[in-house]
Amino acid sequence: MAVQFVSGQSTAPISGSKAKKQLDVVVQRAGEAFIKEPIAVGLSIGIIQGKQTYFYNFGTAEKGASKTPTQNTVYEIGSISKTFTSLLLARAVAEKRVSLQDDVRKYLKGKYPNLAYAGKPIELVHLANTTSALPDNLPDRTSILQQVSPDSIPSLILKASSTYTKENFYHDLHSVKLDTVPGLIPRHSNAGTQLLAYILESIYQAPYEKLVEKYIDKPLHMQSAASVKAGSTLLAVGHNEKGNRMPYHFIDQVEPSGGLRYSAADMVKYLAYQLAETDKAVALSHQPMWGTLEEAAIGLNWSVRKTTDNKRQLLHSGGTFGFASYCSFYPELGLGIVVLANESDRGTQGRLQALADQIIEDMHGVPPALQAFRSHLTTNDYSQALDVYRAVKKAHPELHLTEEFVNEWGYTLARQGKIKQAIELFKLNVSLHPNSWNSYDSLGEAYEMAGDSTLSITNYQQSLILNPKNTGAVEHLKKPRATAGK
């Protein structure tokens, strides 16, 4: 994947007609390649650099129709909606209505002894930094959905959600059993965001959609998400990977976690607001609330990390039954990008991220530190990667390699059949992150690909020592092996 190689682009701004033409060529090439995929339908791209904004559109707003999307075409943005909800929380904190460390039960009627684990309660911050330990959805319909055909799942879920009330939610919340200490492990939870929205409604004594409209839509001059209803000519039509039309998420209960709807023009305004960081609520939402900026962190629903030249990148993606989205911005560079698609499958969000990252890299080039590291690695055929890293780091102190970055790079090489080179990168990752179970797991898998059973087993075992719950390593170790190693 080209996804991880974009981080840390140079700071050259987009300006002038020549730069605009260059951008046009870059985006046109990337967008056309994306839309040529058989499963793709439509695509809208918005880019902001400083005070300049740019929009590009491809495909169609509805499969089988000659209807090219525009910058005002509205898409469901999926889980990016969560950043709107957490921004409202940050606003409540800035207004001193709440504290991030408040026990959520302070805002609930009745007793909820189950919303704590080992004496540690769920705090408001945990609802927004994905560490609440709450289940993904309430109610959990997993077992029921496993008994029906995949094609019928969207309509069944939306039908059930349309009659699922706030009272139903709180009733089911009583039966939740936490399996770990809140604040410890990031985990996707629509239920956590939904609970946060209900708490905010209680604090402000106003419906969620009115809060979004008052504090975000109107100040930023965005088209109100609540005003775009079924039948609107602005709405794109969502599709699944088979090209089938998907139902919309016009359900109030799912808006906070994944049901908001905006155009590329709206989202660029939102990114401009995020980039400025002049609002105390925005600045708070960007602060790491879990993890470290050196590796990977989570703010108030924003993933936060450093690029390869030590700049901040914040990002989020989203998906519904018929739409997928991705947005990313770099405050120090004054740069942001949003990509919206009206087709959704398991891989769409990843393809959108790869598309966005490739556009940024083609626009700005690879940062000198990463370029030097790549060049020296290639010259050495990736051998002695740690020594190469140390030498380049000495010449380019800004070089920053996260575990995730190197891991993705290694898997990219593996998919290209360059197993030997992938192993060298995974060995580098183990050296840089010796306490990471995942780095040993990846190295074990690479040795397994190379047919070296002995070293594969050794690294999988080390991964299990660091993380006994690594079921992937357990499954790999159960596999029959033809040789004792090479």
Image (spheres, rainbow, N blue to C red):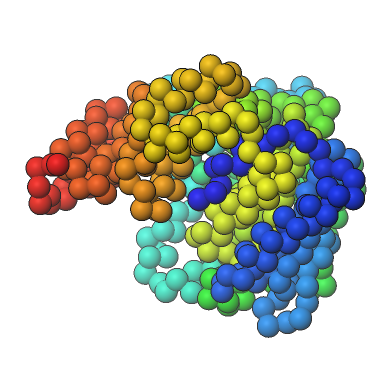
Q: Is 19 displayed left or right of 118 in the figure?
A: right
Q: Nearer the viewer, residue 442 or 94?
A: 442
Q: Quadrant of residue 41?
A: bottom right
Residue 76 appears in the rendering: no
Q: Is 473 displayed left or right of 330 in the figure?
A: left
Q: Nearer the viewer, residue 102 or 280?
A: 280
Please state the horizontal and vertical placement of residue 445, each as a whole percent of the image. 29, 44
**How many numbered marks have been drawn onto this rendered protein structure?**
0
Relative to residue 45, is residue 182 depicted above or below? Answer: above
Q: Quadrant of residue 461?
A: top left
Q: Is 317 displayed left or right of 381 in the figure?
A: right
Q: What residue appears at the point 59 percent right and 21 percent down from the top-left corner?
A: 396
Please state the horizontal and vertical placement of residue 260, each as a whole percent of the image. 71, 54
Q: Nearer the viewer, residue 466 or 26?
A: 26
Relative to residue 485, is residue 385 depicted above or below? Answer: above
Q: Nearer the viewer, residue 104 or 321?
A: 321
Q: What residue appears at the point 49 percent right and 69 percent down from the top-left corner?
A: 153
Please state, as top left, top right, bottom left or bottom right, where the C terminus lies in the image: top left
Please state the horizontal and vertical placement of residue 338, each as a whole percent of the image. 72, 50
Relative to residue 102, is residue 107 depicted above or below? Answer: below
Q: What residue appears at the point 87 percent right and 43 percent down from the top-left corner?
A: 15
Please state the horizontal and vertical placement of residue 48, each as a whole percent of the image. 81, 45
Residue 370 appears in the rendering: yes
Question: Which residue ends up furthest to the front in the rendered image?
Answer: 379
